[in-house]
Amino acid sequence: MKRVKPFFVFFAAIFFIILMVPSLLVAPFAEKTKATLGEELAEKKTTDVLQKESKVSVPIYRSQEKKIDEVPLEEYVVGVVAAEMPAEFEKEALKAQALAARTYIVKELFTGQNVGSPEGAVVTDTELHQVYKNEEELRRIWKKDFDWKIKKIKEAVAETRGQILTYDDKPIDASFFSTSNGYTENSEAIWPNALPYLKSVESPWDEKSEKFLAREVFTVQEFEQKLGIKIGKGNSIGKIIERTPGHRVALVEINGKKFTGREIREKLGLRSTDFSWTLKGDQIIVTTKGYGHGVGMSQYGANFMAQEGKNYKEIVSHYYQGIEISQANPFLSKYMAKK
């Protein structure tokens, strides 16, 4: 047997090291690469969650185009939250709004009432039901702020995906409005039916809302024409003879004629049924507290609650008394079975 020359052994060792160095350099980072991939997949899963929903779609009558669009349910909820609540609001408030919006449409689909919608549609995209905007419309409205706003709203909707509000195992009338006068209102004070979960509750946060106080000025002639009355002579213009549980005007009498607070609000175009007025010269100055009908969830109240650290479950449980957060699937399955 021939002896192996030392220089041959030396060069063989060098060659072996050259082959192994790339593997040795890559090895320490192998686990890190796997972790990064896992994080990217998790992020993509969150982003795509709205696209992996059930096959339920919402037939919406688009009032401007005068056509019916079929929109996936969770995509519809995104469009409603974006149109009905400022994206600048806290995410927990947006999540509460998502529950209200989803509950509303699930109830409409489940009951099949379709009140005020053209044939073939379940809802319109107007205040008659819920205001809805698609991404193309929102991009025009939001312009340079579109990306961060739509991302925030999609996250709020995705994080509450499939959740609705129920009472006695049925979807509720999840009504909402802008700003209270410090209290929400009993449903029967505004609408015909008394609903146990739509009862007056305190909402003191609303005083911080930019929409809490407002004033409207009418000439005496305008005031009389709109209400169909003569104010008469004297220092006072009518008197409030009854208030609602939500501290709004239930009934007012002006020179012998009685009006409900709702009638006054509608005839004068006021923001709220919590109003008062004074006569100054030839002008009547009307002051209102709050903005909206007052029944259900106050949107500004929800936002201020979220700023104080309340989560969306605490928010909806405050404004909708005795409700439960349930899954929408059982109701959607029944809706699909009817189709």
Image (tube, grey):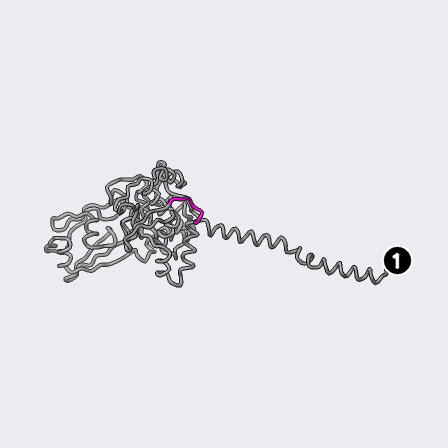
**Quarter residue 196 falls in:** top left
Q: Residue furthest right?
A: 1
Residue neighbourhood size for the residue with mark 1, other residues' Cα within 10 Å, grouped as few (<14), some (14–19), many (≥20): few
Instruction: Check if residue 47 falls in the magenta segment.
Output: no
Decide if residue 213 is in sight here: yes
The image quadrant where one finds the N terminus is bottom right
Q: Quadrant of residue 22?
A: bottom right
Please provide the residue range marked out in magenta.
51-56
Q: Residue furthest front?
A: 1
For the image shown, how many numbered marks are present on the structure?
1
User: Quarter holding the C terminus?
Assistant: top left
| Along the viewing direction, whichever of 251 and 262 lies nearer the viewer | 262
Q: Amino acid at mark 1?
A: Arg
The answer to whether residue 307 is seen in the rendering is: no
What is the secondary structure assignment of the residue under circle 1?
A: loop
Q: Position of residue 152 (x, y in %)?
A: 42, 55
Residue 180: % across, % down = 30, 51
Horizontal relation, residue 198 to residue 307: left or right:
left
Q: Who is closer to the viewer here, 137 or 272? A: 137
Residue at the (36%, 58%) spot, across then down: 136
Report x, y in % for residue 81.
36, 52
Q: Nearer the viewer, residue 136 or 267?
A: 136
**Type of secondary structure dominating the magenta stretch:** loop
Q: Residue at x 44, y 52 (%)?
A: 155
189 left or right of 169 in image:
left
Q: Which residue is mark 1?
A: 3
Q: Which residue appears at 20% of the width and 59% of the height? A: 285
Q: Which of 91 and 77 lies nearest the eye of the viewer?
A: 77
Residue 99 lies, in percent from the top left, at 38, 46
